[in-house]
Amino acid sequence: MSDKKQNILIVEDDTFLQGLMANKVNSNGFEITTASNGEEAMTALAKTKFDGILLDLMLPDISGFDILENLKSDGSKIPVIVFSNLSDDKDIKKAMSLGAKEYLIKSNFTLEELIEKLKKVI
Amino acid sequence: MKDLEQENKELKEALEFKSDLISMTAHQLRTSMSATKWVLKMLLDGDLGPLTEEQKIFIKKTEDNNEKMITFVSEMIDINKEESREIRYTFGKYNLKELVCNTVGEFRGEAAKKNVSLKCHCEEFSRPVEVDREKIQTVIQGLVENAIKYNKEGGSVTLSSKEDGDFVIISVEDTGIGIAEKEKEKIFDKFFRTDSAKKHESIGSGLGLFVIQRIIERHNGEIWFDSKEGVGTTFNVKIPFNQ
């Protein structure tokens, strides 16, 4: 079995939340790459093959939905967990139909629960 | 004079603006409360260094308050959705006894924490009941949650259900603080909380029963209660087998 750590892309524009998530994911044995907007996320995705993505939906430039759409049209198999505070049924349905594996509402989950979900989907 | 069509259009735009404003505010509040939730958890878990017992108590209290505010914001979002009719009801036929008992099961831990005994006496119905599964779960959850929250130490909450012709009746009985006579007529009003509820639990939106009543109305049913202050309350929900 390879010792190589799995690499997770964290897309989150709130730098404080991003830092907390990055610390927790990293301390659970994952490599991490962070992106604060859609452009950074797309650049990272073009450069690196990730094992999983934690994706916020409201980003300052493009939306998380755009990223999901892009991944879908590229035929990507990278599991994506949407981690957002949007909770409208239409947002959840849209994200799931675009291939998200999970849709978690940030305020309802602890970081430990996020890690559990991450380990389950990748 | 503006014609009716123009007024309707303006009213619709104003409602949409209000709805968007609430959604945006809720999103911002949730972001801030998420950060608070995660940091408090890190502190309590000792991730940021050891804490004294007194510090832990203060942080736990802050965590509890933050959780209450998260619930409050979720309720605001629900009511906003309900008001703007964003929520579409999806009716299906379900075994209501199973639905009720499973929902009650979720509250065993909460009841034990408050030393309240939780009983479920539901009879098997002769046929499935046509409901929106999630909405009816919200109703049962809301009623059981209130019955536990506003109960007394060592009290009890009893759920029962029965058939009544073309209807089913679900009842949630508690031995809690009860509702004062003068406050009974306002109990389903939006944002209303009784004086004793406010004393018992400082944070609450006063939206729970309002939302529940709306859901029951959308099921062509009715909700009513019997209550005696200091003795307890029984909420009854009656909905038809078929929509």
Image (cartoon, helix red, strand yellow):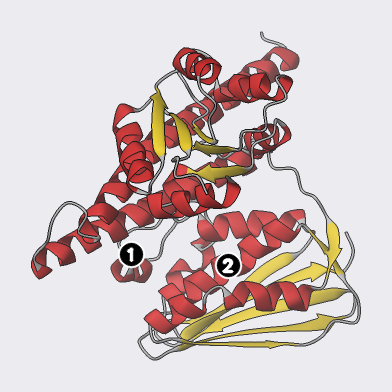
Label 2 in the same subunit as label 1: yes
Kindly indicate the quadrant of the structure image that contains residue B192: bottom left
Specify the amino acid type for callout 2: Gln
Asked if one can make out residue A108 in the rendered structure from this viewpoint, the answer is yes
Earlier sequence position, callout 2 versus callout 1:
2
Circle 2 is placed at which residue position?
B141
Estimate the x, y position of residue B109 in percent, counting from the top left. Answer: 46, 78
Q: Is residue B15 left or right of residue B66?
A: right
Q: Residue furthest toward the top?
A: B1
Estimate the x, y position of residue B1 in percent, counting from the top left. Answer: 66, 8
Asked if one can make out residue B216 in the rendered structure from this viewpoint, the answer is no
Q: Residue at x 40, y 54 (%)?
A: A112
How far apart marks 2 and 1 lie (CA) works out to: 20 Å
In this view of the protein, which residue sits in the foreground, A97 or A116?
A116
Q: Residue furthest toward the front?
A: A1
Kindly indicate the quadrant of the structure image that contains residue B12: top right
| The disc label shown at residue B198, or none | 1
Q: Is residue A24 left or right of residue A117?
A: left
